[in-house]
Amino acid sequence: MSIRRSLALAGAAVLASSLVLAGAQGAMAVGATGTPSAAAQAEKAGHQSLDLSVHGVPGTFIAGGDAREFTYRIDNSTKTDFVAFPLLKFKNKAGSLKAKDLKLEYQLPASLPGGGTWKTASVAPGGGDGDDSAVLMFLGDVTADGDAADGALLYVAQGKKIDIKVRASFTKDAPLGKAGVVPVVYSADANDENDHGRFSCDGIKGAGFTIKAGGGKPSPTPTPTKTGKPTPTGSGSPTASHTPTSSASPTATATATATATATTTPTTEPTTPTATPTTPATGTASPSASASASGAPTTPAGSDSSSDAPQPIDFPVQNPTVTPPKITPAGVTQAKSAAATADKSLATTGGGDNTTAIAATGGAVLVAGVGTLVVLRRRKSGQQG
C-alpha cells in the first residue's frame, strides 16, 4: 500500500471520528430536551428530595477562638428542578446552645449574584432560636421585616449542585461539650406553582464536633514558692548534726570534751561548723526544679492533641418546626434568572460542563482531519509538478 493511500485512509478515519463525536453530542442534547423515558419517570417518582451534606467540619471548636471553615453542599440527583432556601441547624447534646453563642458566615458561589463574598447568617425567620432545642441559621438575605428575601432563593436544576462555604465560631461563654451541625433546606418543585415547599433535614449527613474551653492560661495551683521553700528546722544551726540522742557511747563524751576545748582554746580550728552548712544546701530546691517536680503545665489550657476528624452526632436532630419562609413566584423567577446567568458565565469560562468538553474534543479532531487532507493535497501537487 502506498504512503499516499495510507495517509488518505488516516484522514478519512479522523473525519469519521469527528462526525461520530458530533453525532454523540447532538444525541445528548436531544436526549436532554426530549421526553423522559419510563425508567427516568420511575427514578423521579422514587427520589423527590435534594441531597444535603456538610464536608470538612472540624472535630473541635474553641470557645472564644477563631472561626473554622467547612462546606455545605446541596445536590440535585433527581429528575426535578428545585428552588430552595439553605439553612443550617446547630445543636449541642445538652440542648442549651443559643444563637448568642454562635457566629456564622457564608459565601455563595462566585457565579451567583452576591456570591464570592462573606456574609453574616441570621437566625431563621419564624423563630429559629430554640427550635428543637437548637439554633436554626438562615444562609441568605432577609427583608426589613425579618422575612426571607426573594433573592435568597436558590435554583438547583436537575443534575446540578451548589457548594456554599461556611465558617463558624463560638463565643467564650458558649456551652462546652458535644455538639453538631445538620444541613437543612426549605424546597419546592421549581415548575409547580402549587408546591409551596417543605423542610428537609438530613441528620445522618450532619457532622458532630466538640466545643472546648480556650484561654491559654496555665493553672494557678502549682507554684514554686510553696513546693521548694525549706522548713525552719533545716535553716542551718551548727548543732543540728550533733543531737544528744544520737549515741550514749564514750565517743559522745569525747565529742563533748572536744567541743569544750574548742570553746576555751581560741587557736583550735573548729571542725564541726564547716560540715553543718550542707544541711540547708541539701534541703533547698531551685524554683525551676520545684516547678518541674510539682507538675506545672507546659501547654496552654484548652489545647488538644487528638484527631480533628468530624464526629458522629449521637443525639436526635429533628426537622424544623418554625414558621416556614414563603416561596413566591417572583422569587422563583429571580432564582431561575440567576442560575441561567451563572450557567452562561461558566460556559464562557469553560466551567466544568461535560458537553463543552465533548464539543472541544470533537473540534480538535475535526481540525486534525482537515490538516491531514491539506498535507495530502500539497504532497499530491508536489508530485504532479
Image (spheres, rainbow, N blue to C red):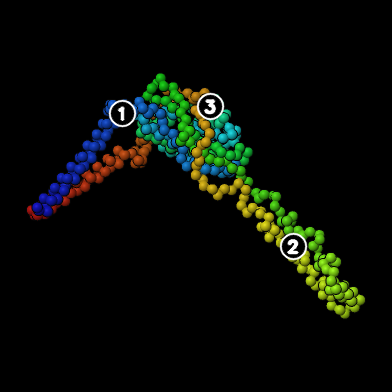
Label 3 residue SS = loop
* Mark 1 or 3, closer to the camera: 1
Q: Locate residue 358: give its quadrant.
A: top left
Name the spot of residue 227 as percent of width and height, x first: 73, 56
Alpha carbon distance from label 3 to label 2: 67 Å
Give the spatial CA distance, label 2 vs label 1. Answer: 85 Å
The residue where tag 1 is placed is 40
Cα–Cα span, label 1 and label 3: 36 Å
Res. 14 image quadrant: top left
Secondary structure category for the residue under label 1:
helix
In the rendered image, residue 324, in percent from the top left (x then y), is placed at 50, 24
- Residue type beneath disc 3: Pro
Q: Quadrant of the C terminus?
A: bottom left
Tell me the residue that label 3 is attached to. Answer: 125
Extreme-right residue of the structure: 264
For the view shown, which residue lies furthest in the bottom direction? 267
Q: Nearer the viewer, residue 325 or 277?
A: 277
Q: Are marks 2 and 1 in contact (CB under 8 Å)?
A: no
Q: Where does residue 213 sit, x and y in percent of width and height?
A: 61, 43
